[in-house]
Amino acid sequence: MKRRLFLLGVVLPFSFLCGRELFVSPSGSDKNPGTQKAPFATIACAAAKAQAGDIVKIAPGIYREQVTFARSGKKEAPITFEGARGKNGEFLTIVEGQGTTLSKWVPAPEIAPDVWKTELQKRPDLMMMDGKMIGYINKLTMALPRVKPLPEELTEELIWSKFGPGCKRCPGLDLLALKKDILISHRYFGKRKELFWPTIGNVLTGWSNGKLYVRFTDGSTPEKHKFTASYGNGFTLKRVSWLKFKNLHLRGSRYQIRILGGSSNNEIDNCLLMHGGARVRIEKNAANTVVKNSILTAGFLRGDLFQLRASYDMRGGVLYEFFKYIIGTSLSDDMGIQIFGPGAKIYGNVILQGLIGVHTDAPHSEFYNNVVMQMSSVGVYSGPRTIGQFHHNLLINNGIPIRIHDLRTARAERIEHHYGNLVIQAPHDGSQVFVHCSSHVRGPDKINFEPPSPKHKYPVYKKNPPNPVDPGKFYIYHNTFWGGNDFNPGFHVGYYYNRFRCVQPFLFINNVIKGCHRFEDHSQEVLAGNLLYGYPGSANKEPLRYPGVKKHNVLIPEKVVNTLWNNKKIPGLYDVTLAKNSPALGIGIDISRPFTFNGKTYPAFPGFKPGYFKGAKPAAGAFQDGESMQMFIDMYRKTEQAMQIIKNAK
């Protein structure tokens, strides 16, 4: 008997760790046992019955369901939900929000010609047309009373004005009635204007008082399309741990995967996620989530226009305004990944076409080896609770590639490291790194400001603040920034120096970036070892206001920029590996060891081991002497494949 118990003690754990294989198929039944010959019909059924160590294999097909997962796996035995892929990488297992297919459309002449309506008692969370996300006016704008006459031009105050007394926003039902050739303008665009309707796909929807309205401006009618009103989330993880999702295409919900607080150690791998306000939303106290090797995209009707374009084409900017102020209520209403929970690791993903690529406001996160491309607003956005590393990412044609948001608006530890990134913008459009601070308006820092006075036009920090907020530390080093605007600086915090009357906690070291006269070394802890290129005329004649910029950095004029890089032909990218005699060579600070700058000693920075460069000093930028950019080329080729997969998605 004792011997038999010993054998069971060996065999049972092994059997438990291996788990079972459960099967799901559109041709199955939830009354089946879930075997390969008798599969379940729904993922929800499999999720309710799967145990630690099980692998749920989901056959090709469309599963119109929204699943809440409430059963956990274990560290040594996760529960895996795995879909099927085709020979060309196409996703064959599709999970789509159940939604409501709309019909019985009738004209709505009381709104305008070319407007139709249908009965729909509940307001949707998302509107789809022919499998694509389309414009859907937010509920606050739809609730505004109509005004007459209709505007001749869609101006900033008509889309951006705050709700409440004095609100001047164009009401939702009036937005649906705007003339076909109406132009949109905004101070962001200067004197430029753009046609509104073509940029949003010539279609717009809104819900009011039990009716769903749709407007076309290209002569189409609702009967020619399939309209779906969607509600709720695709997958919801409710206080569960050790679940894995692989090779699944989720679409057509408000959030494709929402991970609630109390969940931990869940993984999303090689999935295609599209549509909704966010592809993945990781809530506060949802810990240690991994999102890897996946494709995330808005899947909007005119996704091709999200990209930042030449200065004469502002359609990407119009989409920014549209998603933020018409679909959203003044908050960005489209994100690839939202991170509020600690310990997230996001790597190897392609985040393509949307408003914001990744939004993180959580401690101990890491975002690396991702491609973020064609975000009309921000590529990488960090909030006031961020402690994290953002490194070796490829950021291409985003409105603002890196945005450090809400400086000093929360009493939370904040430490950010941005390094080894390759950032590519249109040659003469867009900024590079943008710092945002409105702590004089909201948050615990507000009490520390003096009101405006004849001496100070704007609120400034008190010389002896009663309870100052620690802003944190920001390390930005060894990045290569290609392109960008000719006037706005690649990185500028002088404004905040003036507001707070003190040096700001930024260490901008060993970068290659387009510069301008607004670089100010006095405004931050360290501005050194950088190569600033693209100055008009001679670098010696550039009217810099602060001599420390020239003392601790290298400036080169526009005419010698080509001496920086090897400039070999790389389809879709720019070769920014360093030329043999590049002026970026040997100008940096060795950040792999403690170093001293202006009498203050700093510890070694993460990401670089001693000996990472040749010679006495490192080169500025993401590449050292002789280093290849093959990793970024491979990442870009992966993006091309992802774009093809999205294009062919059924």
Image (cartoon, rainbow, N blue to C red):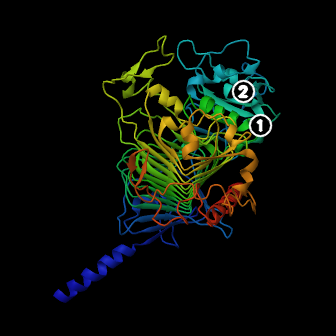
**Disc 2: CA contacts within 10 A as few (<14), some (14-19) or many (>=20):** few
Q: Residue furthest left?
A: 2
At mark 1, the secondary structure is loop
Q: Quadrant of the C terminus?
A: bottom right
What residue do we see at 59% from left, 29% from top? 138
* Marked residue nearer the N-terminal end (2 or 1): 2
Q: Is residue 486 visible?
A: yes
Given this view, does label 2 or label 1 mark the residue nearer the observer? 2
Can I make out residue 335 in this image?
no
State the residue position of label 1: 313
Disc number at residue 261?
A: none
Mark 2 element type: loop
Left-right relation of 302 to 340: right
**Cβ–Cβ under 8 Å for marks 2 and 1:** no
The spot of residue 640 in percent (x, y) is 70, 59
Q: Residue 106 appears at what percent x and percent y?
A: 73, 29
Q: Is residue 28 above or below residue 253?
A: below
**What residue appears at the point 79 percent right and 31 percent down from the top-left corner?**
217
Q: Which residue is mark 2?
A: 190
Q: Residues within 10 Å of mark 1 (few under 14, many from 20)?
A: some
